[in-house]
């Protein structure tokens, strides 16, 4: 009996132990399940956060790429515009190079024509027994002062001086029409005979008076070397126009009268050092300076100025005047010291 009770108690205890084990197992499984659920939730949240982060980064990257793309498109548009500008500038540069070549050719042709004309004047004057000196680089032919004037005087020598200018006027009257005017004018017959026709090459011919460095003491109407040179250039101009009246009608390509005058005194010597008489004698002279006309420039930008810097420098004068040939009277300047060919200084 007691044995039966003990056996029954054991079975009951074993049954309670089994139930306890199942309950513990279920508790563990529930705990594990809760942990797993929590882990899954955390992973899901982390994945969602990471996805949001990546989406934001992707959006920011897309925005940046779109902005860079817009900037690249703008740069591309600017580059295209620059390319068109460069093409236009290259085309203009090519035109300028062509124009420069043409202008250079015209200038060289004008200088060659002037040099040839200077040689022509020298040779023709030599045929008439008169000597002139030429300077092709400066575009000048000159008559020494001793041929035209006595020392300290501004009245031409009645024999040698007047004869020299009469011979020069004859030569210039024949040949100068071939170098002035415009291309659309009728070719003068004399130019056909001479085989020379270079219209519009000469802009102005300045008759320049020069003296040596000896100080001129005021006598009569003249105060100094500058005024003496002015009076002499006027006397030379007046005789030249009287001997060759057609010269006073010549005009350059712009319709301006061709001849003018200037006086420099001792300020532009040929011989800078003036020690002996020969050096001083070379500085006492009358120069005829041929200033070239500026070439016709279709593209402006310096090439179409009135004259080149070299030529414009030649045209500067302390005193200059251009007059019609029929106006050879004493200039009306309101000053009794105005030059006149019939006057002689009192020295």
Image (cartoon, grey):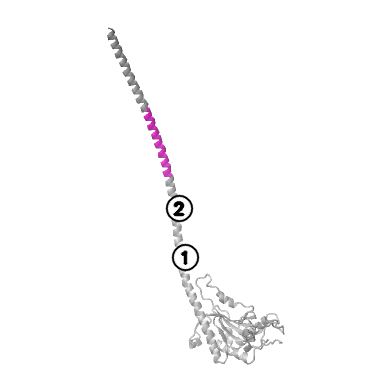
Residue 285 magenta: no
Q: Can residue 323 be seen in this view?
A: no
Residue 300 placement (x, y as % from top left) = 52, 70
Residue 211 placement (x, y as % from top left) = 65, 83
Q: Residue 71 got which mark?
A: 2
Q: Can residue 208 be seen in this view?
A: yes
State the residue at coordinates (36%, 27%). Answer: 32
93 vs 240, nearest the viewer: 93
Would you place residue 34 above or below residue 193 in this image?
A: above
Q: How crowded is mark 2: few (under 14 residues within 10 Å), some or many (20 or more)?
A: few
27 vs 146, nearest the viewer: 27
| Cα distance between the residues tagged 2 and 1 | 26 Å
Residue 133 placement (x, y as % from top left) = 57, 86
Quadrant of residue 283 within the rendered picture: bottom right
Helix, strand or loop at mark 1:
helix
Residue 339 placement (x, y as % from top left) = 67, 83
Q: In this view, does 259 lie to the left or right of 92?
A: right
Image quadrant in which the N terminus is located: top left
Q: Is residue 144 left or right of residue 35?
A: right
Q: How crowded is mark 1: few (under 14 residues within 10 Å), some or many (20 or more)?
A: few
Q: Residue 109 got which mark?
A: none
Residue 45 magenta: yes
Helix, strand or loop at mark 2:
helix
Query: Residue furthest toward the top?
Result: 1
Image quadrant in which the C terminus is located: bottom right
Q: Is residue 238 left or right of residue 65?
A: right
Report the predominant secondary structure element of the magenta stretch.
helix
Q: Are marks 2 and 1 in contact (CB under 8 Å)?
A: no
Q: Residue 89 got which mark?
A: 1
Q: What stretch is highlighted in magenta?
A: 34-59
State the residue at coordinates (39%, 30%). Answer: 38
Q: Which of marks 2 and 1 is nearer the N terminus?
A: 2
């Amino acid at each position: 009996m007691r044995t039966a009770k003990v056996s029954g108690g054991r079975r009951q205890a074993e049954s309670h132990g089994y139930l306890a084990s199942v309950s513990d197992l279920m508790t563990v499984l529930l705990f594990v399940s809760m942990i797993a659920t929590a882990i899954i939730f955390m992973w899901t949240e982390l994945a969602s956060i990471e996805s949001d982060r990546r989406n934001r980064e992707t959006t920011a990257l897309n925005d940046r790429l779109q902005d860079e793309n817009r900037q690249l498109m703008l740069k591309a548009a600017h580059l295209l515009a620059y390319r068109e500008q460069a093409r236009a500038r290259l085309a203009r540069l090519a035109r300028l190079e062509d124009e420069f070549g043409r202008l250079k050719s015209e200038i060289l042709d004008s200088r060659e024509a002037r040099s040839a004309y200077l040689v022509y004047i020298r040779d023709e004057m030599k045929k008439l027994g008169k000597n002139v000196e030429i300077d092709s680089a400066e575009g000048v032919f000159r008559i020494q002062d001793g041929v035209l004037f006595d020392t300290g005087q501004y009245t031409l020598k009645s024999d040698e001086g007047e004869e020299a200018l009469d011979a020069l006027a004859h030569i210039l009257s024949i040949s100068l029409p071939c170098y002035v005017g415009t291309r659309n004018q009728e070719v003068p017959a004399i130019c056909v005979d001479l085989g020379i026709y270079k219209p519009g090459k000469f802009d102005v011919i300045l008759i320049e008076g020069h003296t040596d460095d000896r100080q001129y003491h005021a006598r009569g109407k003249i105060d100094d070397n500058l005024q003496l040179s002015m009076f002499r250039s006027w006397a030379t101009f007046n005789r030249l126009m009287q001997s060759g009246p057609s010269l006073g009608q010549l005009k350059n390509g712009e319709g301006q009268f061709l001849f003018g005058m200037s006086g420099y005194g001792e300020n532009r010597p040929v011989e800078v050092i003036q020690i002996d008489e020969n050096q001083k004698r070379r500085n006492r002279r009358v120069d005829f300076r041929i200033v070239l006309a500026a070439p016709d420039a279709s593209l402006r930008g310096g090439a179409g100025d009135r004259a080149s810097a070299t030529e414009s420098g030649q045209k500067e004068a302390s005193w200059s005047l251009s007059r019609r040939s029929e106006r050879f009277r004493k200039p009306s300047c309101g000053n009794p010291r105005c030059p006149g060919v019939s006057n002689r200084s009192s020295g």
